[in-house]
Structure formats: structure tokens, C-alpha cells
Image (cartoon, rainbow, N blue to C red):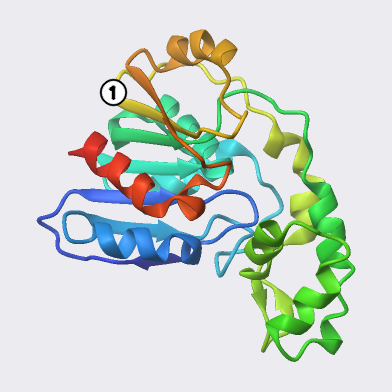
Amino acid sequence: MLNTVISETNPTLPPVLIAHGLYGSARNWGAIAKRMSDTYRVTAVDMRNHGESPRAETQSYADMAGDLADAIPDRSHIVGHSMGGKAAMVLALSHPEKINHLVVADIAPVAYSHTQVHLIDAMRQIDLSRIETRGDADRQLKPLVTDDGVRAFLLQSLDVKGRRWRLNLDVLAQEMEDIIGFPKVTGQFDGPTLFLSGGDSDYVRPEHRDHIKTMFPKAKFAKIPGAGHWLHAEKPREFEAALRAFLG
């Protein structure tokens, strides 16, 4: 079973499940989940091989979708970002009865060419025996990952006291081709679907829309101006407002 962080347990509220992206965790979504718990029963999960969830030998989307299916009651709203968005799409296509509204954040059901293995290589080069503070890790990582935002994001998955990454780096590297790809899935999800993208991101392109519509015929598309791929972290208030407007 996946590790979960539950922001609201009131059984009378409609359930929302949040699935994070590659190298993320439920903790990344804490602020948005807590604010939305005034209206929804919000659960964020650590995906397999991330956070405190079990370590597994695969990172396939069929397996990740199965994990999510076990984590939610039927007729849940589901929000998935990047890798979590692909897993949520596979879940919606294979088990449409589980999903009420589907929100896919800055990803399309297509294969991408930009591998993320270089970030695993960077994390592997950190000498964890010399880490006393997160600042120590940041100084080691900075020459390898120069973008401050990406570096801060990765360091959220570092257990400083335990001197370990809360990521199964070996399996994530091994499964990278599947992670940046998208499986051949039959079926269709004809429920309400929102593809919410960062205005400065190129992950969801105009040429993807026809393909998306074949699987998600009720798909709507929206962008958050000034946001990139990590739109929920860069523009959390705008992201929250878009979720409320769509789910409400």
C-alpha cells in the first residue's frame, strides 16, 4: 500500500486524491491539500519508489495505476502531476468507474524524449556521509544542478538525519524509458477532464490535443500564465483556484 498523507478525513466531503510527479512526494502538495480540505477529503500519496512508500522492482504505469486504484474509493476526483498525471490517466482509462473528475497537470499521454536520468546521476554523486544540514547537500549539488528551483525540489526528497534519499534511484534510472513514455492503453474516459498546464511549459502542445480527445472526449484545456512545469509550486494560489473552479 502507498504511504498517504490525509489532510481531511470527513467522510461526508467528496474525496480528492493527489498523485505527484517524478522525484516528488506527497509533502510537495501539503499546502494545497491543506487549503482544499475545507471543501474536500484530500489524500496525497507517495508513489511507489518515492517518499515513504514501498520500494518495488518496476515503475510501470500499469503498476502505478493499480497502486492508485487501491488507494481511493470509487468516484473520487484525482489530480495527477507529470508522472502522476500519466498514472492517473491510465487509471481513468482502465478503471473509469473509480474516477469522478480527472485533472492532469502539465503532461500529455505521449512519449517524451527528455530523459531525467541526469538528475539521478547528480543525486548519486552527493557524499551523504558529509551531510549535516540541507545546506551541506545544496552546496554539493549546486555545481551539478544549477537551477535553484530544481535543486530545492530534489532536496525535499533528502532525509538529512537518515542520510538517505527517499527515492529508489536505481529502479527509477532502470525504468526511465517507461517513465518518459506512455503505454498502449485501450479504453476511453468520458468523464470531466481538465488538462491544466503552465503557460511557460511545452509539455502539452497544440498537436497533442486531437490525440488527447480520442481518449478523453470531454477534455478541457487551460493554462496558468507565468508558470512552468512545476505549476503547482510556482503558482499555488492560481493552481488551487483552477482546481476549485473545475471540481466545483
User: Residue at (37%, 65%) from the top-left corner?
Assistant: 31
Q: In this rendering, is residue 44 above or below 111?
A: below
Residue 118: x percent and y percent? 85, 50
Figure quadrant of residue 127 = bottom right
Residue beneath disc 1:
191
Residue 38: x percent and y percent? 17, 61
- In the image shown, does 229 or 216 lie closer to the viewer? 229
Residue 5: x percent and y percent? 39, 67
Figure quadrant of residue 208 = top right
Residue 112: x percent and y percent? 71, 28
Residue 173 showing in the rendered view: yes
User: Residue at (85%, 88%) from the top-left corner?
Assistant: 130
Tag count:
1
Figure quadrant of residue 244 = top left
On screen, residue 23 versus residue 91, left or right, reads right
User: Residue at (35%, 21%) from the top-left corner?
Assistant: 220
Question: Residue lying furthest left in this view?
Answer: 12
On screen, residue 147 versus residue 11, left or right, reads right
